[in-house]
Image (cartoon, grey):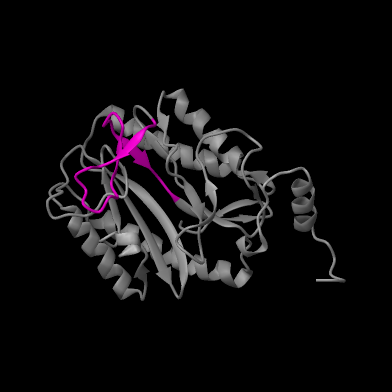
């Protein structure tokens, strides 16, 4: 507005826009009230995954996981955002071993000793969205799968550490790719993190590979997910032809994949996790 002082955020956005960089529009910068609403959704989202952690075990079907998530949402006045989103039939994504993401819960998918599974939940509370996922190791698995799960979590943490006020999306991706490739893992390129909060998917796309200084400028008030999908082999993926809904994503070489995800808000001091 005319007469209002120019803030550091305004200066940075104008500077980088003049340099030809991609900068956020004002609607991508959340108000304190909106951030508080997303934070409350994040508390419920965390509670859902904590509830899954209590009960997940070998012999359990992924449909049972879906039931836990649905029941928890009902008990906490939340809506599972995935349910019926673009035809997705369940309330949560359950992705086992070589399924990278968007695995559909089924009675016939029964967890076995040694499986690794990603449980990905998005909750809506009073119109605000929060999104997170965790990996679970079922019983005892191989050292190779254990390492994959660990490194995927490290990739999330390293990506979050690289995200500073007025950095770029590419800074996150560069840090993640560098770490994953130390282990000769593939970083999925066909799927990415994203803005979130007022809708399930917003700008910007948060890619998990790339070069520093590329992509959108990240400024305080922006809310987004980081969710690197790390494959034991190739980074390439395909859609399962046997999935009637066209959702399940499989590694190109059918080796295992792992993913961890949080919703973050950028502050003046760096990222704050909203799905702790």
Nearer to us in this view, 29 or 50: 29
Q: Please provide the residue range marked out in magenta.
A: 235-261
Residue 248, image x, y percentages: 28, 47
Residue 254 x, y percent position in the rendering: 26, 32
Total labels drawn: 0
In the rendered image, residue 21 lying in the magenta stretch gets the answer no
Q: Position of residue 107 (x, y in %)?
A: 13, 55
> Considering only vertical position in the picture, is 247 above or below 25?
above
Indicate left or right for 247 with 108 as reference.
right
Q: Residue at x 73, y 43 (%)?
A: 20
Q: Residue at x 52, y 71 (%)?
A: 37
Q: Residue at image x 38%, y 42%?
A: 259
Task: Name the residue rendered at 80%, 71% in the picture.
Answer: 1
Q: Main secondary structure of the magenta part?
A: loop
- Examine the image and state in which quarter residue 184 appears: top left
User: Residue 95: x and y, percent?
Assistant: 28, 46
**Left or right of residue 158, residue 145 in this image:** left
Tell whether 53 sits left or right of 203.
left
Task: State left or right for residue 185 relative to residue 113.
Answer: right
Tell me which corner region of the image, top left, top right, bottom left or bottom right, holds residue 32.
bottom right
Let me know if residue 239 is in the magenta part: yes
Q: Residue furthest right?
A: 3
């Amino acid at each position: 507005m005319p007469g209002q002082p120019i803030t550091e955020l305004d200066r940075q956005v104008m500077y980088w826009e003049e340099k030809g960089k991609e900068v956020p529009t004002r609607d991508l910068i959340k108000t304190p009230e909106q951030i508080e609403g997303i934070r409350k959704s994040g508390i419920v989202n965390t509670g859902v995954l904590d509830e899954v952690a209590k009960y997940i075990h070998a012999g359990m079907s992924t449909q049972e996981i879906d039931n836990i998530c649905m029941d928890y949402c009902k008990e906490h006045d939340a809506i599972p955002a995935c349910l019926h989103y673009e035809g997705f039939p369940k309330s949560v994504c359950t992705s086992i071993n070589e399924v990278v993401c968007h695995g559909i819960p089924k009675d016939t998918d029964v967890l076995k000793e040694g499986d690794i599974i990603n449980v990905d939940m998005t909750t809506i509370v009073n119109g605000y969205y929060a999104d997170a996922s965790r990996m679970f190791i079922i019983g005892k698995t191989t050292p190779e799968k254990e390492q994959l799960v660990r490194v995927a979590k490290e990739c999330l943490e390293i990506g979050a550490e690289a995200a500073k006020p007025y950095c770029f999306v590419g800074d996150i991706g560069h840090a993640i790719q560098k770490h994953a490739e130390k282990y000769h893992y593939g970083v999925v390129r066909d799927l990415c993190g994203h803005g979130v909060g007022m809708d399930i998917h917003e700008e910007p796309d948060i890619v998990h590979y790339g070069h520093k200084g590329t992509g959108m400028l990240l400024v305080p008030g922006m809310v987004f997910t980081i969710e690197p999908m790390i494959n034991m082999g190739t980074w390439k993926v395909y859609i399962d032809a046997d999935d009637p809904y066209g959702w399940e994503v499989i590694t190109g070489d059918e080796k295992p994949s792992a993913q961890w995800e949080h919703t973050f808000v950028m502050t003046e001091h760096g990222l704050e996790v909203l799905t702790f």
